[in-house]
Image (cartoon, rainbow, N blue to C red):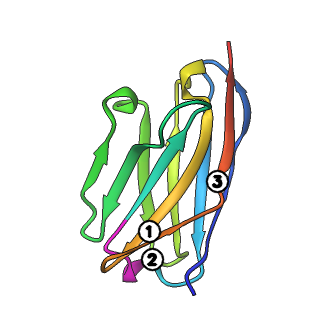
């Protein structure tokens, strides 16, 4: 059973930074891709950033230049460095990992950005 545990969320002022971590119960090298999604109240869950097994990254337009996704296979962890945070970044952030055709999700971590 694959488990993903997110951490690092919290309350931060606009312009500040946070780093989210997603620790996997299995080696992240086994995942085809890993990503961070977010869901704000009343909105659909959206992709924030993803990273393939080969290291290719992809970002939502709204976070390009501010967020950076990385993975450390030795620690079975994926990170999301978030800089220059804005109030509109407020959401629950979820980690997702894909093995073959199966997606696994973490429980989410709240990020709140105050103006």
- If the image is split into quadrants, where does the C terminus sit? top right
- The image shows residue 64, relative to residue 71, as above or below, that is above
Q: Residue at x 48, y 43 (%)?
A: 45
8 in magenta: no
Q: Residue at x 57, y 87 (%)?
A: 1
Q: For the residue carrying disc 3, how many other residues have a C-alpha within 10 Å: few (<14), some (14-19), or many (20+)? A: many
Mark 1 vs mark 2: give the one in front.
Answer: 1
Check whether the beta carbons of the residues at disc 1 and disc 3 lie within 8 A of each other: no
In primary-sequence order, the first of circles 1 and 3 is 1
Check whether the beta carbons of the residues at disc 1 and disc 2 lie within 8 A of each other: yes
**Residue furthest front in the image:** 42
Q: For the residue carrying disc 2, how many other residues have a C-alpha within 10 Å: few (<14), some (14-19), or many (20+)? A: many
Q: Which residue is mark 3?
A: 108
Q: What numbered label is drawn on residue 20?
A: none
* Relative side of 64 to 1, left or right: left
- 83 or 110, nearer to the observer: 110
Check whether the beta carbons of the residues at disc 2 and disc 3 lie within 8 A of each other: no
**Residue furthest top in the image:** 115
**Residue furthest right in the image:** 11
Q: Marks 1 and 3, Cα distance to the nearest angstrom?
A: 13 Å
Q: Which residues are magenta?
A: 28-33
Residue 17, image x, y percentages:
61, 32
**Residue furthest bottom in the image:** 1
Q: Which residue is mark 1?
A: 97
Q: Which residue is mark 2?
A: 28
Q: Answer with the quarter of the image where residue 46 lies.
A: top left
Secondary element at tag 2: helix
């Amino acid at each position: 059973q694959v488990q993903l545990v997110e951490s690092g969320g919290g309350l931060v002022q606009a312009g500040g930074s946070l780093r989210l971590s997603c620790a996997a119960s299995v080696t992240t090298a086994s995942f085809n891709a890993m990503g961070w999604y977010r869901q704000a109240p009343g909105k659909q869950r959206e992709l924030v950033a993803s990273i393939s097994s080969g290291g290719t990254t992809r970002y939502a337009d709204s976070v390009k230049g501010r967020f950076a996704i990385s993975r450390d296979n030795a620690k079975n962890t994926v990170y999301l460095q978030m800089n220059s945070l804005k109030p509109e970044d407020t959401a629950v952030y979820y980690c997702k990992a894909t093995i073959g055709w199966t997606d696994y999700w973490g429980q989410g971590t709240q990020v709140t950005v105050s103006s």
